[in-house]
Amino acid sequence: MFSVPQSSKSEFLDKARQAREERKGHKEREKAATQIQALVRRFLCRCRLQKQIRKEVDDYYQASEAGTTKRNALSIFKIARKLLFIYRLEDKMRFEKLCRAILASMEVENEPKPDILQDNKLVTLYLTMLVTFTDTSTWRIVRGKGESPLRPALTRICENIMGHLNQKGFYSILQILLTNGLARSKPSLSKGTLTAIFSLSLRPVIAAHFSDNLLRSFLLHIMSVPAVVSHLSVLTPEVKTHDLLRKFILFLSREEQCLDICVCLEGSHTLCLLGNLIHLGYLSEKVLEEEANHFVKDLTDMLSYCQRYVSQKKSNLTHWHPVLGWFSQTVDYGLNESMPLVTKQLQHLWGVSVIRTLFSDVLSKKLESQESTPPPPQPSTSQNNLPVKNLFKRAFQKSASVRNILKPVGGKRVDSAEVQKVCSICVLYQTALSTLTQIRLQILTGLTHLDDLLPKLWAFICELGPQGGLKLFMECLNNDTEESKQLLAMLMLFCDCSRHLITILDDIEVYEEQTSFKIEELITISSFLNTFVYKMIWDGILENAKGEKLELFHSVHGWLMVLYERDCRRRFSPDDHWLRKDLKPSLLFQELEKGKKRAQLLLQYIPHVIPHKNRVLLFRNIVTKEKESLGLVETSSASPHVTHITIRRSRMLEDGYDQLRRLPANSIKGVIRVKFVNDLGVDEAGIDQDGVFKEFLEEIIKKVFNPALNLFKTTSGNERLYPSPTSYIHENHLQLFEFVGKMLGKAVYEGIVVDVPFASFFLSQVLGHHHSTFYSSIDELPSLDSEFYKNLTSIKRYDGDVGDLGLTLSYDEDVMGQLVCHELIPGGKTMPVTNENKISYIHLMAHFRMHTQIKEQTAAFIRGFRSIINPEWLHMFSTPEVQRLISGDNAEIDLDDLKKHTVYYGGFHSSHRVIIWLWDILSSDFNAEERAMFLKFVTSCSRPPLLGFAYLKPPFSIRCVEVSDDQDTGDTLGSVLRGFFTIRKKEPGGRLPTSSTCFNLLKLPNYSKKSILRDKLRYAISMNTGFELS
């Protein structure tokens, strides 16, 4: 009955809790108010203190500047403590004054000279502070006689300062400062500033006794700044002190350290580090000589790292780099301005000084001299002797008096230290060639600058292995060892450099002066290369080659083809030098029929190892197969489509052009029947069984290639044909050139030889050789104008200032009575030719004369020619061989072969006395020139067919005639019997022999005496009587 209600109890507890919380909140508010008051008081006190200190600092500076207070170290120390205690961004000017006051009290010497810009002034000031407090040498307190007892302690303080700076990213800041100041076309850092920065960066490394950690930071942040050594090399001697290069080389010689540096820097900055190391090597020749092996290894590793990311083409993952080309790592485009300087540093690697140091083992080799025996007196020879023989004789006499000819001899162990060193150096330069893609030509030019390097490297290669030469390198191809790779890299470098050298040398330097290589050595080298490439293909190595082996093949093959093309242009090799006698053409053709890869590769890369006659047979087989596939050959079940054209003799070219130019290529390849109409408008007698078309083709070709028409011109001297630069006087000249190309293509397609001697430079363009990387216009120039070539090469050899000659990069030409100035480059007529650009001028001039001037005409001719002749068919022929394909063989006429394939009509036979006289006259009484005139008289071409007279279409025939051509109605039974039994109606002594060239037919009267036949025939061929159609 006394219990308290439950609700009253709850209310009491709630009120007690609320009262307790109110008391707690009140206490917290009081505490917060106290803290706020304390913070405000502290802030106000701090502000008063800062204001007081700033006033005190300002008063001190004012008093010092006014001279009322003398500055001393203690007063500066007190002021510095106070200012640094309160330092904020607004105190920047006060801090600057403090630094100047401290430096003044330290009596600092060699303070960097400030630049005009305010920022540079501050940089200079702060650098001077850091330079001062990281080295005690300029402190007044430790100066004087004897060793100060304070120096160790003060030095320790400086080391502590440097340690603190390193922890705060000191090297990264210096790298930014150097990069911003130097990575531009015109550096913005003064000499003093640059010296100070480098000194500051070097001091921690020296203090730590070149520890790995600090060396790494120095390489990553300082030595990777673009061309920093270039800027420093003339500014401070510290670059050469402390044996920096040796320490860098040894640090990087550890593979993991080098990889770490490359990974951290990536491509662009690795290249900058590479440039600085190479420049240091150039400056420290002695260290480079002593540490050559490690130096080469370091550079090779760094280049190999960059090479991983060098790409052959543009993609979404690549960036363009001015030295590396397309690069699959991020490129720092901010470094592009400094790339010319970095490139200049890299050039030291292939400069004379470094090459002499690295290749000292090779260059120290003496090419033994030998006593030259005077040649025995030679009897006087006729002018008909080949100039090649005289060239060999002169070359041998000259080279024999200088040194031994280098041939494979063997005898040097490939695992010797000397060979390993040379191999590693070759690997370095080969890696540089494949990595620094945009300056590859500079590298090759540098490596070929020393005339004796390549011959001595060849001599070195000749001594390798037990026997020297080919066997060793063929074994290396089948081995995948590191030693084999290095030996092959040496061969590859030799080939790349030699190919580049021969490409830039002109004929005088190669054949007469024999720069670098003697002619006999070129013969030996070409034989080595020819066999090496042949073995790689025929032994199946090339089929599965990839990577380095494939690059090696292209390198060796490129050098081989440069020599082969040079030999084709001007012979230096003996007969049959390029043929492989162990290769049976029949086996090759069988494998081609079966589609064997090695046979196809052989034909693609080195067709010259196959005899020319066999290649011509192959060409004819290819044409025959195409004819069969196009249905152009008569079969038992079908006849080919025939195109009929009617040609007026008085307008042969115009009618032929109008009727044939619109025909599709396959129709031109097919059968074309020609009907001639004479001047009276009457159809001429005669059935065209290819003979009339042959005459039409020969007449068309004779007209269009006549220089009087001005479609083609003749070269000076040897009078060979090339397109006329002024052919535009014909309204439709380009269509005419295309038509001419088709007609010549048709002649080659049908195996009709035509007497059209082309200039070799023009045929090279028809074959597409001018698109080759190694094509040189200047080499082909003698085939256009030998005198002009001599004048241009004399500019190349001119010892004085070429500018004195008053030449410009232009060509003045007399065009139909008007002087026309052609600029070789835009603005060329205002650009003088100097010693620096004279080589470019020579090549530009040669290119203009042989290409630019006739570019459109040549393109039209090639377009027509290739519509009939597949250009791939002609890849198996050199330029002179294509000329032989067009105009027949330039060898002596084989009368026995002609006699064997002659057909007789009208009663003549092989035992007939007139026929016996004819062959006797041709063999005994006629000289070679007259025999050529005879062949031209009966076939319209002075040269025999390439494959012999068995392939002359129609076959050569001789017919006995009794009457003149206008009365001749053909053979009758009576005329045949009279001819057979030598019965004459009357003496034919007054008539001349005639011919029908369209049928390759000789019409011969039945002469009574041999002397009459000889005289009449000689007169007929000299007057060129013929070309009648019977």
Image (tube, rainbow, N blue to C red):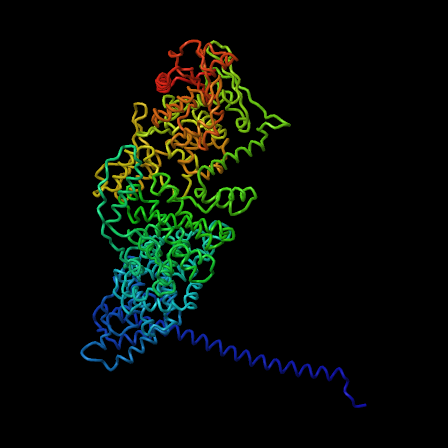
Q: Does 876 sit above or below residue 405?
A: above
Residue lying furthest left in this view? 145
Residue 52 visible in the shown view: no
Residue 784: x percent and y percent? 33, 33
Q: Does 123 sit above or below residue 995?
A: below
Q: Does 658 sit above or below residue 464?
A: above
Residue lying furthest front in this view? 981
Q: Does 155 sit above or below residue 961?
A: below
Residue 251: x percent and y percent? 37, 69
Closest to the observer, 465 or 927 = 927
Closest to the observer, 625 or 385 = 385
Asked which quadrant contains residue 940, the reply is top left
Residue 215: x percent and y percent? 36, 69
Specify whether 5 is left or right of 304: right
Location of the N terminus (image quadrant): bottom right
Residue 303: x percent and y percent? 40, 59
Closest to the observer, 755 or 576 = 576
